[in-house]
Image (tube, helix red, strand yellow):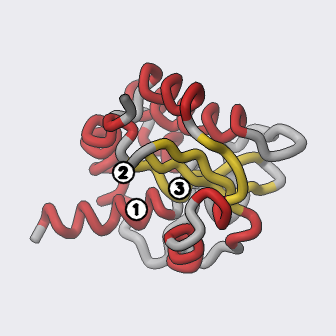
Amino acid sequence: MRILTTTVVLTTLLLAPACGGEGGGGDAGPNAPSKEALLQTLRDMSKAVTAGDLEKALTYMAEIPQADVVKMRQSLPKFVEREGINDANIDKLGAKGKYGPLKEIFPKRGKMWAERLKVEVDDCYAIGVGNAEVAGQWTKAGFRLIRADDLNKIE
């Protein structure tokens, strides 16, 4: 049950990772959404987890309605490792992934991800290649992650 709960929480979290609220690590974001800005948000979240600053890592993610923040924080290191969220895979995603509005990159699943996090799908952007999926909500402060999955499967 614990594994299922962790999976559900993190899946929801990373469905929400870049959506909702003021955020993007608290720093002023770029002026417009871009592939580079979304990749940098993912990279910053990964670096915060690696450094053990799990509170900061959560600031790069969209708020998840009714999520247990303590469980999310505790699960982040395993999640980042399991999904292959590291510089090498982020570089591959940047080089090979297609970027654009969430509803264009993931037309069927993207809307569902945004709805679960109670964010506007029109505010979300994504990068995808093969099974790898990264999505974020664009806010005035930058991206907040709503999804990060299967970066370890990029060839």
Figure check: 125 above or below 91? below
The mark total stands at: 3
Q: CA distance from mark 1 to mark 2?
A: 6 Å
- Type of amino acid at the residue the image marks with label 2: Arg
Q: Kindly give the residue lying farthest to the left in the view shown.
A: 1
Secondary structure beneath label 3:
loop
Q: Secondary structure at mark 1?
A: helix
Q: Residues within 10 Å of mark 1 (few under 14, many from 20)?
A: some
Q: Which residue is mark 2?
A: 73
> Image quarter for residue 28?
top right
Instruction: Give the percent coordinates (x, y) of residue 9.
Output: 33, 66
- Vertical comparison of 131 with 104: above or below: above
Residue position for label 3: 17
Q: CA distance from mark 3 to mark 2?
A: 13 Å
User: Distance of mark 3 from mark 1, alpha carbons?
Assistant: 13 Å
**Residue positioned most to the right:** 31
Q: Are marks 3 and 1 in contact (CB under 8 Å)?
A: no
Question: Percent position (x, y) of residue 84?
Answer: 33, 34
Is 10 drawn above or below residue 73 in the view shown?
below
Taking depth in this image into account, of 69 and 109 the one nearest to the observer is 109
Residue 108's label in the rendered image is: none
Which mark is in front, 3 or 1?
Answer: 3
Relative side of 86 to 65, left or right: left
Could you tell me which residue is drawn at 53 percent across and 73 percent down?
Answer: 108
Assign a secondary structure to mark 2.
helix
Quarter occupied by the N terminus: bottom left
Q: Mark 1 belongs to which amino acid?
A: Val
Q: Position of residue 92 (x, y in %)?
A: 49, 25
Q: Which residue is mark 1?
A: 69
